[in-house]
Image (tube, helix red, strand yellow):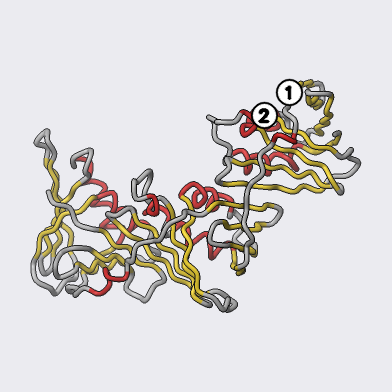
């Protein structure tokens, strides 16, 4: 294997791939990036066996071959070279020689034949979607995913396709986010799959071109997404997502309208003195005012009063301040609408106009 490449041509694809490679590996070769040269293309592959990213770069005057090199070391070498540098890479036995300007590097390599294959079943379902639209859907929901919950189906994101309708749902059991949109073309099928947490975070990071068109293929076990020169693959969470529809079937109280920025600022200030572990704040809601208050084990107290539009019965309810902040920050309008269920089991947060997404936060007992 032998090729020349400009630093800029390899740096971004290498950065995109290295992020899926875990620092601690069960197999040493998983810390490496697989490099294959065929048909005047350099194909880079990185995986942790749950997620895989493949990048394809067009090159000329290259000698075909395959090898694996330590991913982070190779990235650091490329990253720290001056902009515009021409990199020459050549395989010599079990070493890879890298020449750039007056720099010389020699990296230990491992044979490509030992690189594990990413097992994928046949991906029979397909749809296309604009990258900007899909990234917005991911970003409006992913913050609600659980992290290392024993209910492992919550450590991911539900993707629901119903003909031309797209729905994304995430929940950690204390809050829920739902985003709904329509696809440009009908798919002709119904499907529910759960994308793994790490895959969702990686995918959101990779969707940096809002104009790109994504081609999505999936089965009940795997998903593959074509993003420009990249191919993203992930194993899906093998479980059934809980039925969240019942939360919408309860009777709701009168909505409370409040300026989004005022609520965010007040919550941020009051939460300074909340219990560090639970972040609890109390809402005392009256006809024209909302009092937000908190206290902590050190007997510190904070309180702030806001003017609101509300016509319902007075009530007092407590929430995790961070959960409310996350939800309110993801609204696009200047006005936030909070609607509390009559049995005080949940609070719906959305916009005054019919919007594509809803957030639901469960109250706390303080």
Identify the residue at image location x=12%, y=37%. 300
Image spot of residue 64 (x, y percent): 87, 40
Residue closer to the observer: 35 or 181: 35
Residue 218 vs 86, above or below: the answer is: below
Tell me the quarter of the picture where residue 178 sits.
bottom left
Secondary structure beneath disc 2?
strand
Identify the residue at image location x=41%, y=71%. 356
Image mark for residue 107: 1
Left or right: 289 in relation to 277: left
Q: Are marks 2 and 1 in contact (CB under 8 Å)?
A: yes
Residue closer to the observer: 245 or 357: 245
Disc 2/disc 1 C-alpha distance (Å): 8 Å
Identify the residue at image location x=89%, y=38%. 63
Residue 230 vs 132, above or below: the answer is: above
Q: Earlier along the polypeptide chain: callout 2 or callout 1? A: 2
Instruction: Please give the residue where the numbered disc 2 appears in the rendered image.
Output: 70
Secondary structure beneath disc 1?
strand
Q: Badge 2: few (under 14), some or many (20 or more) residues near its Cα, within 10 Å? A: some
């Amino acid at each position: 294997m032998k090729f020349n490449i400009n630093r800029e041509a390899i740096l971004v694809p290498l950065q995109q791939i290295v992020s899926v490679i875990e620092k601690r590996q069960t197999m040493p070769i998983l810390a490496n990036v697989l490099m294959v040269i065929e048909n005047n293309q350099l194909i880079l592959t990185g995986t942790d066996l749950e997620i895989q990213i493949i990048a394809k770069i067009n090159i000329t005057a290259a000698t075909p071959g395959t090898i694996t090199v330590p991913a982070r070391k190779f990235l650091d070498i490329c990253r720290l070279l001056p902009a515009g540098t021409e990199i020459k890479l050549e395989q010599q036995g079990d070493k890879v020689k890298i020449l750039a300007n007056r720099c010389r590097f020699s990296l230990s390599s491992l044979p490509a034949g030992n690189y594990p294959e990413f097992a994928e079943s046949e991906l029979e379902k397909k749809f296309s979607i604009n990258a900007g639209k899909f990234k917005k859907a991911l970003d409006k929901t992913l913050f609600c995913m659980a992290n290392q919950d024993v209910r492992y189906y919550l450590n991911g994101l539900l993707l629901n396709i119903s003909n031309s309708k797209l729905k994304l749902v995430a929940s950690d059991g204390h809050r829920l986010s739902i985003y709904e949109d329509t696809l440009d073309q009908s798919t002709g099928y119904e499907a529910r799959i759960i994308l793994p947490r790490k895959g969702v975070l990686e995918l959101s990071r990779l969707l940096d071109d809002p104009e790109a068109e994504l081609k999505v293929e999936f089965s009940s076990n795997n998903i593959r997404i074509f993003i420009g020169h990249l191919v993203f693959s992930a194993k899906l969470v093998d479980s059934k997502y809980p039925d969240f529809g019942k939360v919408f079937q309860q009777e709701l109280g009168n909505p409370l309208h409040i300026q989004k920025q005022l609520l965010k600022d007040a919550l941020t200030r009051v939460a300074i003195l909340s219990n560090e572990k639970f972040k609890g704040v109390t809402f005392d809601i009256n006809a024209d005012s909302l009092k937000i208050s908190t206290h902590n084990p050190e007997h510190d107290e904070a309180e702030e009063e806001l003017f609101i539009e509300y016509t319902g019965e007075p009530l007092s309810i407590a929430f995790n301040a961070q959960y409310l902040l996350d939800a309110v920050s993801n609204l696009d309008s200047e006005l936030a609408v909070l609607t509390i269920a009559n049995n005080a089991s949940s609070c719906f947060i959305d916009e005054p106009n019919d919007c594509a997404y809803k957030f639901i936060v469960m109250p706390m007992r303080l």
